Amino acid sequence: MSKISAVIITKNEAHNIAKCLSALKAVADDILVVDSFSTDKTKAIAEENGARVIQKEWEGYAKAKNFANSKAYHDWILSVDADEILSNELIQQIQAIRLTTGTVYSLDRINNFCGQWIKHSGWYPDWKIRLFDRNEVYWVGAYVHEKLKHPVNYKIERLSGKLYHYSYATLEDHRKRIETYSQLAAEDMYANGKNASFVKMYLSPVSRFLKTLFLKRAFLDGKNGWIISRRNALLVYLKYKKLKQLETKY
């Protein structure tokens, strides 16, 4: 049976990392944490829970994850975030699977927003390729929304069991993430020569709100679905506002 290296990148994840690592121990022969010099106890907690830890300055999501993959002991990589936990069913599926060259494996991620599992709002289903052979598969993306690139002829196999993503514990946590993502998105758009027009800045947020609330059926997620719809609109507005600021600055 092929051995698996579990790989995680971190920055101040002391509140999440122990639970994440506890689940990974059941499926991984090697656990590597690449930490961007956390100021909390992330490094210590990871080491106490059996992970190898390498500290490295932050260079962006794709670069950080590719670096981490290169330092893993084994070619088969299980890539997870510190706020993600394998369900028992998913653990059993990974333990039983026969890893096959030419195949990548997709996990059924479900996101938790302020204590509620979100089953609509464009957040679910949320299949993510996370188990792969590093010799043929790697991360791409300069700023945000990194994704895995694999040969076009590769088969994508979906595994049963959930990958629990405890993404936003509080509304404030979500707001801070919006600020971060909107800045990264603005930098990405600026680097690709995109402009912040009046229509994009003021009409695109309205379009995103309506799309999330109705087409993505956020209303079925109740109050939090309404909040997510409004916050999605805010994210769109902020990224174009920040793009405009970059255009003015440079």
Image (cartoon, rainbow, N blue to C red):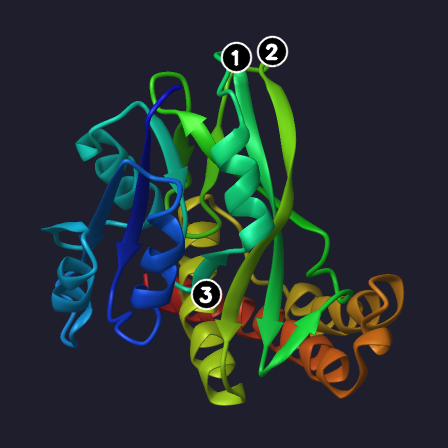
Q: Quadrant of residue 198?
A: bottom right
Q: Hey, what amino acid is under mark 1?
A: Gly
Q: Which residue is mark 3?
A: 181
Which quadrant: the N terminus? Answer: top left
Q: Secondary structure at mark 1?
A: loop
Residue 33: percent from left, percent from top: 22, 51
- Label 3 crowding class (10 Å Cα cut-off): few <14, some 14-19, many 20+? some
Q: Which residue is mark 2?
A: 153
Q: Hey, what amino acid is under mark 3?
A: Tyr
Circles 3 and 1, Cβ within 8 Å, touching? The answer is no
Q: Secondary structure at mark 2?
A: loop
- Label 1 crowding class (10 Å Cα cut-off): few <14, some 14-19, many 20+? some
Q: CA distance from mark 1 to mark 2?
A: 8 Å
Say whether residue 109 is left or right of residue 122. left
- Camera-near label (1 vs 2) is 1
Look at 37% across and 20% down and name the residue there: 2
